[in-house]
Amino acid sequence: MLIVDTECKILSITDSAPEGLVEIIGLSFTEPEEGSYIKPDKGSDIQLKCTKAVLEDIEKVGFVRDISYINVENNSKIRFEYVGKFKVVLGGPADARYKLSQLPGYVEVIMNAQPKNAQGEIDMSDPSGKWSYYPNK
């Protein structure tokens, strides 16, 4: 596992992620070396760009400790887990910072309408801007 900064510079290589850091899923890379930047495998350039953009936005809105992983396997359906309760489908990196900044208010509405142990999926990927919540059953 690689520990990287928001520019995808490799800070360290480890067997497990320290608590409080975001795990990145779906990014293929070659030749990781501490102190260098991630070199994407052929065909993974878009995933690297998405990763950088979303990591930067997560840091800007102050969510680094609230997100356990980001999945960039599909760059138009970027996914992550928020506060250990909600699987979020962000969509593409466009408007990610706005969507992320609005997420706490949306979750507050869900928590007020649902039991305190509400969990489920929040889909923010609709191009019309409509968000949907699908509670776990």
Image (cartoon, grey):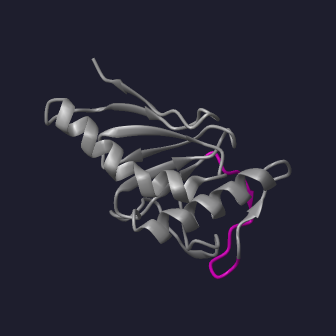
Q: Quadrant of residue 78?
A: top right
Q: On screen, 33 above or below 115?
A: below
Residue drawn at x 29%, y 40% as measured from the top left: 85
- Quadrant assignment for the C terminus: top left
Residue farthest along the bottom direction in this orientation: 35
Residue 27 shown in magenta: yes
The x and y percentages for residue 14 are: 49, 66
Q: As rendered, which of 34 and 112 lies closer to the eye? A: 112
Residue drawn at x 61%, y 33% as measured from the top left: 128
Q: On screen, 133 above or below 22?
A: above
The x and y percentages for residue 125 are: 58, 36
Q: What range of the chain is rendered magenta?
A: 26-36
Q: In the shown orientation, is residue 112 left or right of residue 46? A: left
Residue farthest along the right direction in this orientation: 42
Q: Quadrant of residue 107?
A: top left
Q: Quadrant of residue 9?
A: bottom right
Q: As rendered, which of 39 and 98 lies closer to the eye? A: 98
Q: Main secondary structure of the magenta part?
A: loop
Q: As rendered, which of 7 and 111 lies closer to the eye? A: 111
Residue 124 shown in magenta: no
Q: In the shown orientation, is residue 30 left or right of residue 52? A: right
The x and y percentages for residue 10 are: 61, 74
Q: On screen, 77 above or below 137?
A: below
The x and y percentages for residue 112 are: 18, 37
Residue drawn at x 20%, y 31% as measured from the top left: 113
Residue drawn at x 39%, y 62% as measured from the top left: 63
Q: As rendered, which of 53 and 114 lies closer to the eye? A: 114
